[in-house]
């Protein structure tokens, strides 16, 4: 169905995109728009996952919710994934897409393979071995940042010639044309008279962190409590939980001293107005760094390749100890003007040399269409 004419009607190439996480929603919806600009017909699916569903609603999108996130336990993950595959089969058979694209969605890769639909993968996280092993061997192409060597991906069973690298980090896709919305300050009852420190707990349910951390967020709580005490409450702290369990504990331990959003928010705008970001994950660390904000990473796993690149570029400080994190945070806040100026300058220099991954992916798919189908 590659733009072929049938009875006088031009049939567009159909692409199915599966969205699993908040980062993927921001990233893949941008790719979706670029694909449409290049003449593709795009269909999106997602799953029941609190932050994703809230973000879909916040952005006014209409995406079918099929299946759910499995939570923390391995058995529950497996059951949810198996059930979702069954639901997706019925849905995808009706759409009859020509190509499937996902950010290493195990269900999308399996359904596409089973229905003989070429699967195209996008991934910047080789440290997430479980999803890589379940998706990359089933993919015809892999799109990934250039800072990740091809040999890192080859071990997952994809040939070097099927790996396409782009000169960018994924958040560039939505950061390059980003305009902050000051409404975020009003919505969260913040002001610019005092510094804003945004904190993001770790992805406690991720398979690659299993057994390494608590389900909740003790490090986040300790850092917030120390900052509030040492700065005598002359700081505004916003903590963005990932799960309802985290939200519940954060509210119990930190009472009314910090802002804890009840639902998904415009995080990019919040980061824009923040003086400092402390993150135990990945995407918001990168997002904040590219926006020119000082970032302290307390990611509990091994340093990722993307994080290492940003540390070397002096856009991220890697600190795992809560006490050292607080000490560095105090130094940054007490010398905010100097830190913000230098980080902004470095971020702009790097950002200006990066290309738009969405444009690269759309162009490459159009160019390689005949080989894929």
Image (cartoon, helix red, strand yellow):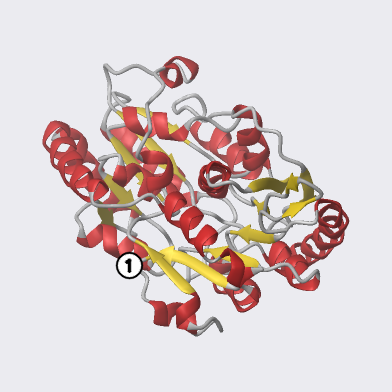
Query: Which residue is rendered at x = 46% and y = 73% of the image?
Result: 163
Quadrant containing the C terminus in the rendered view:
bottom right
Query: Crowdedness of circle 1 by 10 Å Cα count: few (<14), some, many (20+)?
Result: some
Task: Measuring from the top left, give residue 320's x and y in whole percent.
Answer: 34, 59
Query: Label 1's element?
Result: loop
Viewer-proximal residue, 70 or 93? 93
Image-quadrant location for residue 157: bottom right
Query: Which residue is rendered at x = 47% and y = 27% of the image?
Result: 259
- Answer with left or right where residue 117 lies relative to residue 60: right
Viewer-proximal residue, 126 or 140? 140
- Answer with left or right where residue 269 lies relative to residue 290: right
- Answer with left or right where residue 119 lies relative to residue 304: right
| Above or below, 25 relative to 197 | below
- Answer with left or right where residue 292 lies relative to residue 252: left
Quadrant containing the N terminus in the rendered view:
bottom right
Query: Label 1, on which residue?
Result: 147
Query: Which residue is rendered at x = 64% and y = 35% of the image?
Result: 56
Tag count = 1
| Above or below, 97 relative to 295 | below
| Above or below, 310 relative to 50 | below
Viewer-proximal residue, 356 or 213? 356
Task: Measuring from the top left, give residue 117's x and y in whole percent.
Answer: 73, 67
| Above or below, 56 relative to 284 | above
Task: Measuring from the top left, give residue 36's x and y in whole percent.
Answer: 58, 43
Viewer-proximal residue, 187 or 215? 187
Task: Measuring from the top left, give residue 74's x and y in whole percent.
Answer: 72, 68
Q: Can you name the residue that lies furthest to the left here?
A: 338
- Residue 73 seen from this side: no
Image-quadrant location for residue 190: top left
């Amino acid at each position: 169905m590659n733009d072929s004419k049938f009875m006088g009607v031009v049939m567009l190439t159909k692409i199915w995109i599966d969205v699993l996480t908040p980062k993927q929603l921001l990233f893949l919806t941008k790719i979706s728009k670029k694909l449409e600009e290049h003449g593709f017909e795009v269909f999106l699916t997602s799953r029941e996952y609190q932050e994703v569903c809230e973000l879909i609603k916040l952005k006014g999108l209409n995406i079918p919710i099929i299946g759910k996130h499995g939570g923390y336990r391995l058995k529950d993950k497996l059951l949810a994934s198996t059930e979702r595959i069954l639901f997706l089969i019925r849905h995808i058979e009706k759409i009859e897409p020509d190509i499937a694209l996902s950010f290493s969605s195990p269900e999308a890769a399996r359904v596409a393979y089973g229905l003989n639909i070429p699967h195209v993968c996008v991934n910047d996280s080789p440290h997430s071995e479980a999803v890589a092993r379940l998706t990359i061997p089933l993919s015809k192409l892999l799109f990934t940042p250039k800072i990740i060597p091809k040999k890192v991906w080859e071990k997952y069973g994809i040939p070097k010639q099927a790996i396409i690298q782009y000169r960018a980090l994924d958040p560039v896709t939505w950061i390059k044309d980003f305009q902050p919305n000051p409404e975020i300050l009003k919505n969260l009852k913040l002001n610019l008279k005092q510094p804003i420190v945004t904190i993001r707990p770790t992805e406690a349910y991720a398979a690659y962190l299993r057994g390494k951390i608590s389900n909740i967020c003790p490090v986040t709580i300790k850092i917030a409590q120390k900052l509030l005490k040492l700065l005598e409450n002359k700081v505004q702290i916003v903590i963005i939980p990932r799960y309802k369990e985290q939200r519940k504990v954060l509210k119990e331990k930190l009472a009314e001293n910090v802002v804890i959003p009840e639902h998904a928010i415009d995080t990019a705008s919040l980061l824009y107005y923040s003086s400092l970001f402390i993150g135990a994950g990945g995407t918001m660390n990168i997002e904040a760094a590219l926006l020119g904000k000082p970032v302290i990473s307390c990611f509990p796993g091994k340093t990722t390749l993307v994080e290492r690149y940003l540390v070397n570029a002096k856009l991220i400080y890697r600190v795992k100890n809560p006490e050292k994190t607080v000490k560095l945070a105090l130094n940054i806040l007490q010398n905010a003007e100097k830190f913000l100026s230098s980080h902004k300058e470095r971020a702009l220099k790097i950002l200006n040399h990066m290309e738009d991954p969405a444009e690269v992916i759309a162009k490459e798919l159009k160019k390689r269409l005949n080989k894929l189908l």
